[in-house]
Amino acid sequence: MNSSVIPVAIIDPDAPTGSLEKKQPDVNNGVEVHSKEGYFSKDYAELEWENLWSKTWLIAGVQADLPNIGDYFLFKIRHESFIISHTQEGIRAFYNVCPHRGARLLTEEHGNRKVFICPFHSWSFSNNGDLRSITDENTFQPEVVCHRPGLKQARVEVLAGLIFINMDEHAPSLKDEIGLPEGYLENYRIDQMKVVRHVRSEWGSNWKVGVEAFYESYHLHAVHPETRGVMADLHVQYDLYPKGASRMIVPLGQPSPRHHDQQTVNEGLQMMLAEAGVDPSAFEGTAVDVRKAIQKGKRERSDRLGLEYERFTDGQLSDSWATGIFPNVQIGCHPEAVFLMRFIPHDTDPGRFWYDTMTLMFPVEDPNYCPPAWMGLPEGTDFTGNTRPETESYLIDEDPGLGLVLSQDAAFLPSVQEGMRSKAFDGQLWGEQEQRLRHFHVELERRLNLRE
Ligand code: FES
Ligand SMILES: [Fe+2]
């Protein structure tokens, strides 16, 4: 990097080498302008299907959704649908296709089945994929069915409560592909969390425009000006990991350096203090002291309630560790909860994608519990983990009720998609606050065999 480029922030300059918070070494991903074709072209979307989606580890869902044997959920990506099934032998992923005439076996998104019965001619399969029965089998020539056709499987690996699948039987293991240091995700104990909200909404841009918008904090001041009082958008630490993984640490509870008022403990900061158990009316510091006070408040509460926050740094108690797993995931990691986002390509239209979000948290029994504002949970959310909420699904013109910040993104991104298509636009010009975007595209092009 040219030494005159303004360096981006380091959250804790004293973080020990090898620690999760330590700023990663710079990666030289060059300065070139990448082709914009991939945002509009159906051929490019097919190339992505062949070389990316069909060959990479994808988060199909979470272990929290399969607590009992027989539990399953469906995971759909473009024209493929998978049954992720908790069998006697563990978690398996089956193509949701009947080997008889190709009917979809299951259509309900979640459920518990020991046996899958095809709705077309009632062939049945055990939930471990074996064929159980063929209706009127004596009417088939034996050669047609003597191989006892069962359900085809994709590979499955479970890491930190996240269920990954891979359609490529020759792909390297997840451990070799995920790029994040061992223990990074495990530390959050997502396997002990419950899904409290799951929303899937259709957005009007290519999936990569979605990933890009969530991989930088450079647009916050312009698109989300109300975050200025509570997010230090210019003090973000960007980290690049192998295999296209990356992270940004966004300090919360601290005004943006762009904000005119660094003194007043504004309403947003007051709310954050209260969430951390600090009485805002008794707080004597200024706005810039709030982040530390949040950390202290949470540390004390953890010691009192045995929440085991010893495994987190002070920074982790206040900040958002927005963690990207290539190709299409970002997880907002917090000690109490995680926000799992997946950017899922549209079946046919490169100009659309599915923004799929799950909020997972440790169950809370207290009926007066008030969740942190960043979680954006509607009133009436069940925090006990006793009931898995229905997945809410919204088409492009419907309001998914994701809260102000996300609806600002949903409303804005189609104009980026359209503007990039103009013949006057030559390709994106990324700064160092957008280094995760360049890192993502270098990995994408490598996977698509467009570069070494
Ligand atoms: S297609 Fe499934 S039983 Fe005929
Ligand atoms: Fe945004």
Image (tube, rainbow, N blue to C red):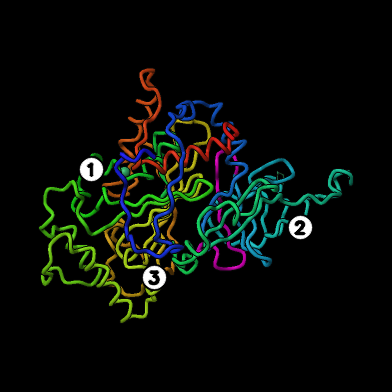
Ligand 2 shown in quarter: top left
Residue 141 sits above or below residue 338 on the image: above
**Label 2, residues with CA under 10 Å away: few <14, some 14-19, many ≥20:** some
Label disc, if present, on residue 384 of the rendered structure: 3
Q: Which residue is mark 2?
A: 132
Q: Position of residue 445 (x, y in %)?
A: 54, 35
Q: How many marks?
A: 3
**Which residue reaches farthest right?**
142
Q: Judge depth for marks 2 and 3 and give the one in front.
A: 3
- Mark 3, Cα crowd under 10 Å, few <14 / some 14-19 / many 20+, is some
Task: Find the magenta span and give its range.
Answer: 64-80
Question: Is 157 drawn above or below residue 75 in the view shown?
Answer: below
- Quadrant containing the C terminus is top right
Where is mark 1, residue-wise? 221
The Cα–Cα distance between marks 2 and 3, rounded to whole angstroms, is 38 Å
Q: Marks 3/1: CA distance?
A: 36 Å
**N-term mark: 1 or 2:** 2
Q: Residue at x 23, y 63 (%)?
A: 291
| Tag 3 secondary structure | loop
Amino acid type shown at disc 2: Arg
